[in-house]
Amino acid sequence: MIDILSYDMKVIKWEKIINVRCVVIMVVKNLKVIIQSNNIINDISFTLNDGDKIGLVGNNGSGKTTLLKALSNNLPYIGSIKLNTEQVDYLKQEISYIYNELTVIQYIKQVIGIDSLENKLYELENNLTEDNMDCYSDTLNKYLALDGYNFTDNLNIILNGLNFKESSDMLIKYLSGGEKIKILLACLLLSNKDILLLDEPTNNLDLDAINWLEGYLRKLTKKMIIVSHDEMFLNSIVNKVFELNNGKILEYNMKYNDYLKEKEKEYNNQLEEYKKIIQKRDKLKQQLEKTKVWVSKGNNKKSYSDNDKIANNYAKERTNNSNISKISKALTELEIPYFKEKKELNFFFNLDTDKGNKDIYLNNLVCGYNNFKTPTINISIPYGSKIQICGSNGSGKTTLVRTILNEIEPLSGKVILGSSVKIGYISQDTLNGNTNDTVLKYLTNDIKDYDLSMIFTLLDKFNISYDDKDKPYSILSPGQRTRVNLVKIALSRINVLILDEVTNHLDKEAIDLIYELISTYQGTIISISHNRKYNDILNASMLIDISTGNIEYKNSDNIKQYKK
């Protein structure tokens, strides 16, 4: 449960402010958000100008989603948000709020407001009088603003562009997570809102949809703030980068790739300065210790050889503590800046070493439910393989994974797991598990003889602080929850990793860790991902196209053996 301690909500409409260079669309001043006594957003200020497409970045838990919620008036805050428009639309990360009992077309019309306008126009047109003429004119203008007469054509263009292959008459509850994201994106792109707030818009989208969305948003003239950890996506669209760091905001008036170069330059400069200060500190400490030794020896110059230059330099001052005081004062006054060095990843797994069959067999397997079924899959997956399951949204990728996990029954055929197979699974839904538990309890619930030092080491690698171990799992950001689930898997002595869109919600630092994981893990990996860089690094030995049932084998000795 989220507890907001205090807030002062102010949304002020004003006339356009025109300065020399731009039109100011939004001004945020002294914005603060407090959740459960924690300052998530701490007194930030910025402006959104006409033409701005801003990439909002920062580590998991830095407050990116919180900021978007505040800007969209979905979360109380302290401070002020001044707008020259009330037209703000917000795409959330979570899809749980979508109403599943409506058809696709019904839901989109309801969200956009087309259905109510059409109904009102129909009623007014059938009973048009002088008294309701103003009402009719107002309703018609609203309908025209949404391009209502071309609504169906516009919707089809967007759905086709997003590679949505289902009928618009299908109930939403039967759609996959990726397909639901497409529906929410369609609502957003069809609206007449001036400002778009997009929270991880590429999560769960297939590659065709991502490529289309990149091009569409690049051409769109609306103002945007985009939270994303997809480097290629951000670099294609944004012209500014806002970085959230320790509750504050840093602005970079440049494209995302240039921002990365600038951050690397900043890091190297800070590292150099930090090393200089540390060297100075260490030198002062050495001088202090030597001086204390010399003073303690008193005035007996004979205790030092004539060739001892250091002794000769300080011989005159051995009878007093003046030098000690000077050095001590210099040490006290020396300011050592906070500097966080980049961590060496060196990811390690508590890998299962039991002997026995660790292969997986899919024998004439058909998966599905209701009126949906996959093509027949008939393969053997040898231990140590890297498998990429590919296909468009709604083709059954997650359904296949859930069938392998025995969460749903196959329509026909069998899944046979080797006697020593131990599976670790990270789903698209990072809220799985008992969310009332603390982080530490969540991690250790199903693990016997766990090593606390190993847990803390892994948490630190994933930037989960020691203090976070006592926080409720439920209040963590989606990215933090994914990090915790990775730690849980690392502790569980598994030999088969099933990763379903594992890079969703993660920041760049954690994604780099994932890249190392999939590069070095010695067990079997079965993976679903639309992250282009991730798939390149995975370098799968087998590709399963769930849309067609086709299987492509790549160079691998154990795969070749199974093909014979």
Image (spheres, rainbow, N blue to C red):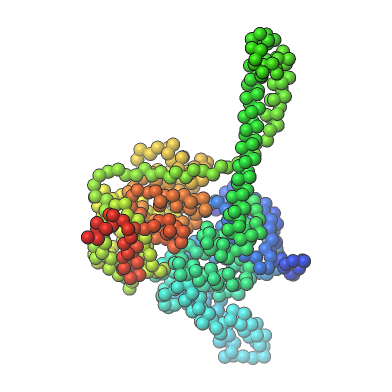
Residue ID at (43%, 59%): 536
Above or below for 402 versus 106 = above
Quadrant where the image shows the C terminus: bottom left
Q: Give the image quarter of residue 308.
A: top right
Above or below for 260 versus 457 = below
Q: Give the image quarter of residue 500.
A: bottom left
Residue ID at (33%, 49%): 523
- Is residue 436 visible in the rendered image? The answer is no
- Is residue 277 visible in the rendered image? The answer is yes
Comparing 489 with 218, the one in front is 218
- Single out the residue that lies furthest toward the right: 20
Residue ID at (60%, 46%): 267
Picture coordinates of residue 274 (x, y %)? 63, 39
Picture coordinates of residue 58 (x, y %)? 57, 53
- Single out the residue that lies furthest toward the left: 564
Above or below for 211 versus 283 = below
Picture coordinates of residue 240 (x, y %)? 63, 61
Residue ID at (50%, 71%): 212
Picture coordinates of residue 94 (x, y %)? 49, 61
Above or below for 460 versus 196 = above
- Single out the residue that lies furthest toward the front: 307
